[in-house]
Image (cartoon, helix red, strand yellow):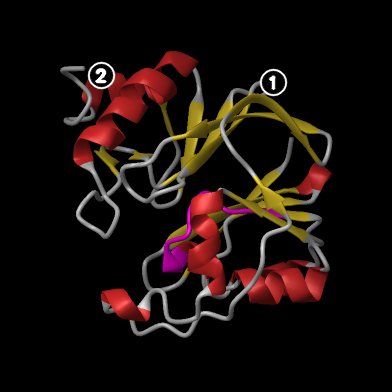
């Protein structure tokens, strides 16, 4: 499986394009330009969560590619209310966009012929989803778990205990061999994080 990675915006946010299936995970600032430059065609855009750095190009990508957009119900207001982020002090203009697929936690969901296990892991952001490719053992984890860190819990809707509980009970049991492609920073593996991540070593 070929996965192209792009990092964009002032927060260095990652997005991932799964070429064989036309699936884009997240839509950071300037990702629409990157897709155009690379000649990539998106069939479905999946959002791990609704924080501004992950959704800035979502409306443009949906418009230009005619693609479906999938996210959790809790993400919808962040996408459709143009003043949502301004109320929390973020001076970003985010073009509103609607969701075509409301996605919840499930053991199996086919999206563009890919079979994902979908985990709901809030605590960094309400409605945070992780998309697990069971066949390739790859977790598109958003901002839940990073190499050497976990997602921030001090933003609106954040909850440290909820985040740690979700990581412990849902993410770590997937297996040490699972590769995590996160919303920021390099790829890592669950086994590495269990051994070395200061937030996880005592779980």
| Residue 99 image label | none
Q: Is residue 52 magenta?
A: yes
Which residue range is magenta in the image?
45-53
Q: For the residue labelled by badge 1, is the local secondary structure a helix, a strand or a loop?
A: loop
Asked if residue 50 lies left or right of residue 194, the reply is right
**Disc 1 packing (10 Å; few <14; some 14–19; many ≥20):** few
Residue 29 vertical position relative to residue 198 in the rendered view, above or below: below
* The quadrant where residue 12 appears: bottom left
Residue 203, visible in the rendered structure: yes
Label 1, label 2: how far apart the Cα atoms are? 24 Å
Whether residue 175 is visible to the viewer of this picture, yes or no, is: no
Could you say which disc has been placed on residue 135 in the image?
1
Task: Check whether the beta carbons of the residues at disc 1 and disc 2 lie within 8 A of each other.
Answer: no
Q: Determine if the magenta segment contains residue 24.
A: no
- Counting residues from the start of the chain, the first of labels 1 and 2 encountered is 1
Q: Residue shown at 40%/49% (left/top)?
A: 126
Residue 19 appears at what percent x and percent y? 77, 48
The image position of residue 183, as x and y in percent, is 45, 51
Indicate the quadrant where residue 150 lies: top left
Q: Is residue 100 left or right of residue 179?
A: right
Label 2: element kind: helix
Left or right side of 99 for 149: left
* Residue highlighted by disc 2: 195
Q: For the point 44% across and 68% down, which residue is it?
A: 52
x and y, in percent, of residue 105 in the image: 56, 32
Q: Is residue 93 above or below residue 54?
A: below
Residue at left 57%, top 53%?
A: 47
Looking at this view, is 162 or 141 the one in front? 162
**Could you tell me which quadrant the N terminus lies in?**
top right
């Amino acid at each position: 499986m070929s996965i192209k990675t792009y990092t964009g915006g002032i927060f260095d946010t990652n997005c991932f394009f799964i070429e064989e299936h036309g699936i884009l995970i997240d839509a950071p600032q300037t990702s629409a330009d990157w897709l155009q430059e690379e000649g990539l065609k998106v069939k479905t855009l999946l959002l791990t969560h609704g924080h501004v750095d992950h959704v800035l190009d979502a409306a443009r990508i949906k418009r230009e590619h005619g693609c479906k957009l999938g996210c959790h119900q809790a993400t919808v207001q962040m996408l459709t209310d143009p003043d949502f982020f301004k109320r929390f002090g973020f001076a970003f203009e985010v073009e509103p966009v609607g969701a075509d697929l409301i996605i919840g936690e499930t053991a199996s969901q086919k999206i563009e012929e890919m079979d994902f296990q979908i985990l709901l892991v809030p605590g960094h952001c309400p409605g945070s989803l992780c998309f697990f490719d069971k066949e390739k053992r790859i977790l598109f984890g958003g901002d839940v778990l990073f190499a050497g860190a976990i997602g921030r819990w001090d933003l609106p809707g954040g909850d440290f205990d909820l985040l740690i509980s979700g990581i412990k009970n849902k993410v770590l049991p997937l297996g040490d061999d699972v590769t995590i492609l996160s919303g920021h920073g390099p790829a890592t593996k669950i086994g590495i994080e269990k051994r070395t991540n200061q937030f996880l070593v005592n779980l």
